[in-house]
Image: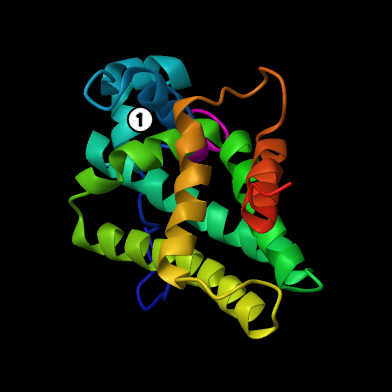
């Protein structure tokens, strides 16, 4: 007990300590793997807890429900994608290289974070938390706007012919994101090599 007049305060209770290191990230990583494999509805918190090696109560220590885990994975994936692609394109010497870097970096991140990326693409439209939706939309818009700026810069410098920027950017992103339907990590070529093929096709066209 503190002496009269003492400024000592009773320490706040910290709650249940994590039972594993980096528990929050482990939960998100394992949840992404399970969601990618079995879907959101096919994954229970009990299965997630078993995968991580904690109790369901420990899961609730970090997340109030399964939906929030899903939405955090989506935002975390978009944050990582935006950061990775921005770093790659920042060192480009011109619009042609910037577009190639954008596409290959996008594909690299997709392959290296396959489970989270698949979860993000499938689950984006099912988000419910308005704050998380706004953050996800902001990140997605920033990513798409960066691509549009590269295309516009290429047109202004004469590197690219005049095109509809919105249609072209959607075509690029559609090709890259559609890879999730058929590409499997570790099954041969890297995703970035396919993205380079896409770039060569777009930049050179089909004329011999």
Furthest residue toward right = 93
Q: Which image quarter holds the N terminus?
A: bottom left
Q: Is residue 21 magenta?
A: yes
Q: Is residue 42 left or right of residue 120?
A: left
Furthest residue toward front = 208
Residue 84 rendering spot, x and y as whole percentages: 64, 56
Residue 64 rendering spot, x and y as whole percentages: 24, 41
Residue underneath mark 1: 58
Q: Which of 26 and 41 is in front in this view?
A: 41
Identity of the residue drawn at 63% across and 58% down: 85
Above or below: residue 199 compared with residue 56: below
The answer to whether residue 53 of the structure is visible from this angle is no
Above or below: residue 113 compared with residue 138: above
Identity of the residue drawn at 50% across and 24% down: 182
Label 1 environment density (alpha carbons within 10 Å; few <14, some 14–19, many ≥20): some
Residue 129 rendering spot, x and y as whole percentages: 20, 55
Say which element carries label 1: helix
Identity of the residue drawn at 44% across and 47% down: 174
Q: In this view, does 16 lie to the left or right of 116?
A: left
Q: Is residue 25 magenta?
A: yes
Q: Quadrant of residue 21?
A: top right
Q: Is residue 100 left or right of residue 12?
A: right
Q: Quadrant of residue 94?
A: bottom right
Q: In this view, does 159 lie to the left or right of 145?
A: right
Image colouring: rainbow
The answer to whether residue 157 of the structure is visible from this angle is yes
Q: Nearer the viewer, residue 101 or 110?
A: 101
Which contiguous range is marked in magenta?
A: 19-26
Identity of the residue drawn at 65% across and 35% down: 191
Above or below: residue 144 compared with residue 24: below
Residue 117 rendering spot, x and y as whole percentages: 47, 39
């Amino acid at each position: 007990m503190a002496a009269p007049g003492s400024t000592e305060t009773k320490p706040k209770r910290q709650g249940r300590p994590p039972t594993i290191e980096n528990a929050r990230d482990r939960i998100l990583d394992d949840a992404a793997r399970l969601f990618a494999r079995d879907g959101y509805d096919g994954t229970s918190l009990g299965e997630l807890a078993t995968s991580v090696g904690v109790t369901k109560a420990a899961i609730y220590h970090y997340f109030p429900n399964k939906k929030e885990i899903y939405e955090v994975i989506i935002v975390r994936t978009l944050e990582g994608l935006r950061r990775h692609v921005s770093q790659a394109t920042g060192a480009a010497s011109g619009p042609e290289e910037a577009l190639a870097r954008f596409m290959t970096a996008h594909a690299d991140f997709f392959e290296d974070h396959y489970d989270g990326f698949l979860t993000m693409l499938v689950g984006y439209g099912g988000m419910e938390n308005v704050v998380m939706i706004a953050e996800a939309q902001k990140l997605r818009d920033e990513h798409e706007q960066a691509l549009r700026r590269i295309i516009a810069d290429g047109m202004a410098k004469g590197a690219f012919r005049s095109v509809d920027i919105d249609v072209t950017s959607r075509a690029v992103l559609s090709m890259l994101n559609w890879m999730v339907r058929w590409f499997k990590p570790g099954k041969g070529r890297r995703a970035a090599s396919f993205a380079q093929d896409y770039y060569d096709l777009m930049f050179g066209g089909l004329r011999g």
